[in-house]
Amino acid sequence: MPSQFFGLTIGYSGLVSAQAAINTTGNNISNVETKGYSRQQVIQKAADALRTYTSYGMAGSGVDTTAIEQIRNAYYDFKYWNNNANLGEYNIKQYYMKQIENYFQESEKVDGFTNIYDNFYTAMEELQKNAGDSTVRAQFLSFAGNLTEYFNEMNTDLVKLQEDTNAEIKNKVDEINSIAARLTTLNRQINVIEMTGSVANELRDQRALLIDDLSKIADVEVKEIPIYTTEGGTELSGANKYMVSIAGQELVNGYEYNTVECVARSHKINESDAEGLYELKWSNGLDFNLYGGNLGGELKGLMQVRDGNNEEYFHGTIASVTNDTITFENLPDYLLDLNKTRLPESGILNVGAKQFEYTGWSFDSTTGAYTFELDLAPGQTTAGITGKGGQIGKEIDYMGIPYYQSQLNEWVRSFAEAINEIELTGKDQYGNPAGVLFIGKNSQDHDHPFDFSDYTRGQTVTSSSQDTYYKLTAANITVSYDMIKDVGKLATTTNDKQGESAYDLLTEMKKVKTDKDKMTFRGCSSQEFLQCITADIALNANSANTFQSNYENISNSITHQRLSVSGVDNDEEAISLVKYQNAYNLSSKMIQVMTELYDQLILRTGA
């Protein structure tokens, strides 16, 4: 039969269990506002019964407190992390599309393209009334300057925005590396504790909170694998290997982690790109898959805003090679119009796993072929690449900053060419052949701007080194220096014999505004430029707003589901507190009763 003091032991086990439950409830209440904290509960079970060797068989031996576990549902965690990546992506897109929308916005206080363009043609009409007046000529050139400055400023704003996204990518990379280091530290601390048989609840909460933060930056995949005492054995050691991947590549593996590095590009991918945009690499030398479908999160949003080209990038099939050239054919239609090209004059060609540095290129409009001049590294050869595909940059299905820069460049090239072609048919006030009205600033040689002297309408072969409209961008378009210095060099007529007030050239220039035969932009007239751009922006902005709102609602719903499981509820904990207090009081009462029994048994029996 059991010991006479067996009841005291049972009562004591109840006290210990109730005390643990009260302490755990108090811990829950204390952390009700702690971010990431998961509600904990005491796991109890009936203690092993004892054989009594009596007719009634086994005797219960009280209660065992086996563990203090956190209440958490991994399914909701995974749902939250997956949705958080989408929310992070569209938060970024929403923010930056709002910035781009503001740049192109017109208001009563801020003159946009429409007002500036209309003022240019209003000044042209005034010049028609008095073409020989130098003051009116200067005023017209001033309004022409306002138009070029508008495009200069728009490009500056977009480049600054691209630099901002680039800097934010660097910040996100630093954040990823910091989280990875903290995760490995927590992995070690958790295993040290749990190998003793305990559960590191608070540390696990901290680790899950870090994954919450990481999941907003990039798509995450988390695995936790138990470690056995021996290879192939069945006995658990208590330790686990915790692994985290982002963008489909390993970030954390137990106690080790990889870091991501930002490496500034040595060459531009798009002609109007900001300098020093970052490519990402792993510390182990592998490329970080920045453009892969598994990226997600804020990094994906930043990458698409910074590099988005609406799938318009250079790619084609290599038709032929020489020792130092590569010729591409079978190109997309948008590459056959040099006004639309965004190719930098020099850069990197990717052919499979090979990279070739090129120093220039030429385009043959009769064959639709591009030929790149190569600067081969020692031992590098073009052998064996004919028939293969090559590209510059990546296909990115998003209208990001490079897309809007290319739209600006296309318009100014088409507009400047249309106006200049008319101006070149005229004579200035001195009877000399007129020069171009719009030129391109030359950052390498200010005194020798691009005046397109190497360009002839209809020419079949154009080289990137030639002075053609390829050199003109929204960043460098300006009004002729010579005309600014001497307004008499502005031609308003094709025949100076008609007098200095003749304006037949101005009549032709006015047609550029509305006549699609003079100039067309995306199938529209030149004055419809802003409508085309704002339609693109509205499409992107509305998409970002809609998806951001949807994913935010989903996030709120999942967060509510998570909290319904793991969150601390004050009312529920208050009930638990009373419940465990009563359990403690009952166990105390039992011990009191047993004390009285022992007192009777020991001190008074037989007295």
Image: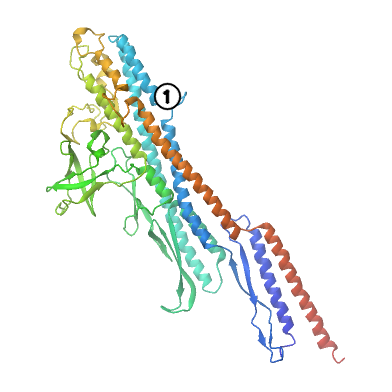
Q: Is residue 485 above or below residue 354?
A: above
- Picture mark count: 1
Residue 475 seen in the figure:
no
> In terms of secondary structure, where does tag 1 sit?
loop
Give the camera-side residue of 586 and 173. Answer: 586
Q: Is residue 472 above or below residue 290?
A: above
**Amino acid type, label 1:** Asp
Which residue is found at the position 73% from the left and 67% from the top?
A: 581
Which residue is found at the position 26% from the left and 12% from the top?
A: 503
User: Which of the 4 image quadrants contains residue 254?
Assistant: bottom left
Q: Pick out the residue farthest to the right.
A: 607
Q: Is residue 574 above or below residue 372?
A: below
User: Which of the 4 image quadrants contains residue 47?
Assistant: bottom right
Residue 307 percent location from the top left of the image: 34, 43
Residue 518 percent location from the top left of the image: 26, 23
Would residue 422 be found to the left or right of residue 260 on screen? left
Color style of the picture? rainbow
Residue 600 seen in the figure:
yes
Provide the residue designation for mark 1: 111
Which quadrant of the figure contains the N terminus? Answer: bottom right
